[in-house]
Image: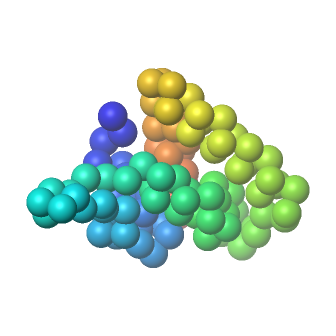
Amino acid sequence: MIPQALIERALTLTGKTIDYVQEYDSHGQNWLSIEKFCYYLCSREFLSKYYIWPYQYPDRNELKELIGEFGNAIMDYQEGNEERLTSLLETICNIQNQK
Protein backbone atom coordinates (compact mmCIF):
# COMPACT_ATOMS: atom_id res chain seq x y z
CA MET A 1 0.00 0.00 0.00
CA ILE A 2 1.29 3.45 -0.89
CA PRO A 3 1.79 5.42 2.33
CA GLN A 4 -1.04 7.91 2.89
CA ALA A 5 1.47 10.67 3.66
CA LEU A 6 2.97 10.22 0.18
CA ILE A 7 -0.49 10.27 -1.40
CA GLU A 8 -1.28 13.48 0.47
CA ARG A 9 2.02 15.08 -0.61
CA ALA A 10 1.36 14.12 -4.23
CA LEU A 11 -2.18 15.51 -4.10
CA THR A 12 -0.88 18.76 -2.64
CA LEU A 13 1.08 19.26 -5.87
CA THR A 14 -2.20 19.18 -7.80
CA GLY A 15 -3.89 21.63 -5.44
CA LYS A 16 -6.16 18.85 -4.12
CA THR A 17 -6.57 17.18 -0.75
CA ILE A 18 -7.31 13.64 0.34
CA ASP A 19 -11.02 14.56 0.34
CA TYR A 20 -10.97 14.59 -3.47
CA VAL A 21 -10.05 10.90 -3.66
CA GLN A 22 -12.32 9.50 -0.96
CA GLU A 23 -15.23 7.17 -1.72
CA TYR A 24 -18.08 6.52 0.69
CA ASP A 25 -20.36 3.51 0.97
CA SER A 26 -23.99 3.50 2.08
CA HIS A 27 -22.89 3.12 5.72
CA GLY A 28 -20.72 6.23 5.65
CA GLN A 29 -17.44 4.29 5.61
CA ASN A 30 -14.79 5.91 3.46
CA TRP A 31 -11.73 4.66 1.65
CA LEU A 32 -9.14 5.92 -0.81
CA SER A 33 -10.18 5.63 -4.45
CA ILE A 34 -7.02 4.71 -6.33
CA GLU A 35 -8.89 5.46 -9.57
CA LYS A 36 -9.51 9.06 -8.53
CA PHE A 37 -5.95 9.37 -7.25
CA CYS A 38 -4.52 8.15 -10.56
CA TYR A 39 -6.77 10.60 -12.42
CA TYR A 40 -5.01 13.48 -10.68
CA LEU A 41 -1.60 11.90 -11.30
CA CYS A 42 -2.23 12.14 -15.04
CA SER A 43 -2.95 15.87 -14.94
CA ARG A 44 -0.62 18.31 -16.67
CA GLU A 45 -0.37 20.18 -13.38
CA PHE A 46 1.02 17.15 -11.55
CA LEU A 47 3.19 15.77 -14.33
CA SER A 48 4.86 19.12 -14.90
CA LYS A 49 6.18 18.89 -11.32
CA TYR A 50 8.45 16.05 -12.47
CA TYR A 51 10.75 18.53 -14.20
CA ILE A 52 13.53 19.92 -12.05
CA TRP A 53 13.86 23.42 -13.52
CA PRO A 54 11.18 25.68 -12.04
CA TYR A 55 10.56 27.57 -15.31
CA GLN A 56 10.74 24.63 -17.68
CA TYR A 57 7.32 23.52 -18.81
CA PRO A 58 7.25 20.10 -20.46
CA ASP A 59 6.15 19.93 -24.07
CA ARG A 60 3.40 17.62 -25.31
CA ASN A 61 5.77 14.77 -26.24
CA GLU A 62 7.48 14.85 -22.85
CA LEU A 63 4.10 14.72 -21.14
CA LYS A 64 3.02 11.77 -23.30
CA GLU A 65 6.20 9.92 -22.34
CA LEU A 66 5.68 10.62 -18.64
CA ILE A 67 2.01 9.59 -18.85
CA GLY A 68 3.25 6.32 -20.35
CA GLU A 69 5.64 5.89 -17.42
CA PHE A 70 2.83 6.52 -14.96
CA GLY A 71 0.51 4.23 -16.91
CA ASN A 72 3.00 1.39 -16.62
CA ALA A 73 3.53 2.12 -12.92
CA ILE A 74 -0.24 2.14 -12.35
CA MET A 75 -0.61 -1.19 -14.18
CA ASP A 76 2.15 -2.65 -12.00
CA TYR A 77 0.32 -1.31 -8.94
CA GLN A 78 -2.90 -2.99 -10.06
CA GLU A 79 -0.98 -6.26 -10.33
CA GLY A 80 0.28 -5.94 -6.76
CA ASN A 81 3.65 -4.28 -7.37
CA GLU A 82 3.58 -0.81 -5.87
CA GLU A 83 7.33 -0.12 -6.02
CA ARG A 84 7.37 1.64 -9.39
CA LEU A 85 4.47 3.99 -8.59
CA THR A 86 5.80 4.72 -5.11
CA SER A 87 9.24 5.48 -6.56
CA LEU A 88 7.82 7.91 -9.14
CA LEU A 89 5.74 9.67 -6.50
CA GLU A 90 8.71 9.96 -4.13
CA THR A 91 10.89 11.35 -6.93
CA ILE A 92 8.36 14.04 -7.85
CA CYS A 93 7.59 14.98 -4.25
CA ASN A 94 11.30 15.13 -3.38
CA ILE A 95 12.06 17.34 -6.39
CA GLN A 96 9.37 19.74 -5.24
CA ASN A 97 10.68 19.74 -1.66
CA GLN A 98 14.12 20.76 -2.96
CA LYS A 99 12.76 23.87 -4.69
Image quarter of the N terminus: top left
Position in image of residue 77 (x %, y %) = 50, 32
Residue 98 visible here: no
- Report the coloring of the rendering: rainbow
Relative placement, left or right, of 92 versus 16 is: right
Return the residue found at the far left. Answer: 27
Q: Residue at x 47, y 52 (%)?
A: 35
Picture quadrant of residue 3: top left
Position in image of residue 82 (x %, y %) = 46, 30
Q: Nearer the viewer, residue 94 or 58?
A: 58
Return the residue found at the far front. Answer: 26
Residue 33 visible here: yes
Q: Nearer the viewer, residue 64 or 26?
A: 26
Q: Residue at x 62, y 58 (%)?
A: 42
Picture quadrant of residue 50: bottom right
Compared to residue 13, the image places residue 76 above or below, namely above
Relative placement, left or right, of 94 versus 50 is: left
Position in image of residue 39 (x %, y %) = 55, 59
